[in-house]
Image (cartoon, rainbow, N blue to C red):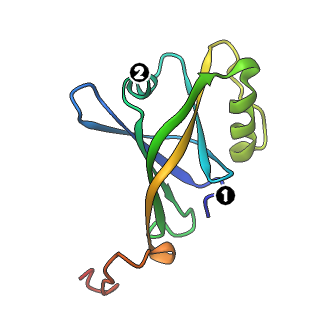
Amino acid sequence: MLVRPNLCVIATLRSDGAPVTTPTWYLWEDGRALVNMDEARVRLRHLRRDERVSLTVLDTPDWYTHVTLIGHVSELYEDQGLADIDRIARHYTGSPYPTRERTRFSAWITVDRWHGWGEHRDSDQPTTNQSTGR
């Protein structure tokens, strides 16, 4: 599921410790997630200050099935030549990223732990009755 271009929500931490979420694209490679952001994005400031991050990937055909990756940014660097955002954009759209004027940054996320639900429910999650939600 993680290698497909599924919907994803990233959570970062504001300076006051409150979580902030936003949709994002990602690539899954070698057990890590690659995300990319414009130089003006607030989440870039958040990640520079606090490397803790969470990604929730929703299975496109069935959003009930999802995996949350809890981890930290292990690498953060300028995306020279927009090579990373082009790879990510091709994964989602089949074309290179169209906006070329602004500097972008890439972050590799190392997974410290994860949990899943639906088809990818891990054994620590309680089972619910699908019809009642209990």
Give the CA separation, mark 1 to mark 2. Answer: 28 Å
In the image: residue 100, left or right of residue 62: right
Name the residue type under label 2: Arg
Q: Is residue 18 left or right of residue 68?
A: left
| Residue 42, image x, y percentages | 40, 23
Q: Where's residue 17, x and y in %? A: 23, 33
Residue 45 percent coordinates (x, y): 41, 21
Query: In the image, is residue 14 above or below residue 4?
Result: above
In this view of the protein, which residue sits in the foreground, 14 or 32?
32
CB within 8 Å, label 1 to label 2: no
Which label sits in the foreground, 1 or 2? Answer: 2
Q: What quarter of the picture does the N terminus occupy?
A: bottom right
> Vertical placement of 46 versus 57: above or below?
above
Relative height, residue 124 to residue 98 (above, below) = below
Tell me the SS state at disc 2.
Answer: helix
Mark 2 crowdedness (10 Å alpha carbons): few <14, some 14-19, many ≥20: some
Residue at (53% x, 45% y) in the render: 110
Query: Which residue carries the number 2 mark?
Result: 45
User: Where residue 74 sits: x, y (%)?
Assistant: 53, 36
Which mark identifies residue 4? 1
Q: Residue at x 62, y 14 (%)?
A: 103
Which amino acid, mark 1? Arg
Q: Closer to the N terminus: mark 1 or mark 2?
A: 1
**In the depicted view, which residue is nearer to us: 96 or 75?**
75
Frontmost residue, 48 versus 2: 48
Q: Against 129, is 2 above or below? A: above
Q: How many marks?
A: 2
Q: Of all residues shown, which one is farthest toward the top?
A: 101
| The residue positioned farthest toward the left in the image shown | 16
Secondary structure, mark 1, is loop
Residue at the (78%, 37%) spot, across then down: 95
Residue beneath the point at 72% across and 43% down: 93
